[in-house]
Image (cartoon, rainbow, N blue to C red):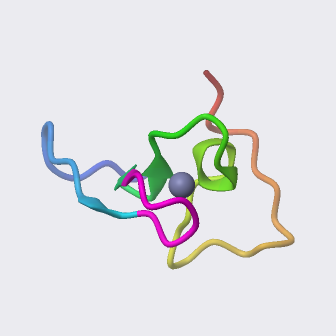
Amino acid sequence: MSYTGGGMYYAEPCPLCGSTLWNGRCENPDCEYHWRPKRDDDDPEDRSTEEQD
Ligand SMILES: [Zn+2]
């Protein structure tokens, strides 16, 4: 995976629940974007498992 910047986090309002998206990941565990972070270049049918908590 490509990693650019150190400690850079991009925050934006979640379009689904109104909470904060951190780099496309919603802080609300009840929100879909918490488990499936929104990405501009993410293919909806491509279920990558590279990110696991
Ligand atoms: Zn959300």
Expressed as whole percent of the image width and height from the top left, the position of residue 30 reads 67, 39
From the viewer's perspective, tell me whether residue 13 is left or right of residue 26.
left
Up-down: is 28 above or below 10?
Answer: above
Residue 19 shown in magenta: yes
Q: Is residue 1 visible in this depiction of the protein?
A: no
How many numbered discs? Answer: 0
Q: Is residue 4 visible in this depiction of the protein?
A: yes
Q: Quadrant of ligand 1?
A: bottom right
Viewer-side residue, 11 vs 6: 11
- What residue is shown at x 45% (from left), y 64% (from top)? 14
- What residue is shown at x 81% (from left), y 65% (from top)? 46
Up-down: is 49 above or below 36?
Answer: above
Residue 16 shown in magenta: yes
From the viewer's perspective, tell me whether residue 19 is left or right of residue 5.
right
Part of the protein shown in magenta: 14-20
From the viewer's perspective, tell me whether residue 51 is left or right of residue 45.
left
- What residue is shown at x 50% (from left), y 72% (from top)? 15
The C terminus: image quadrant = top right
Q: Is the stretch drawn in magenta largely helix, strand or loop? A: loop
Viewer-side residue, 22 vs 16: 16
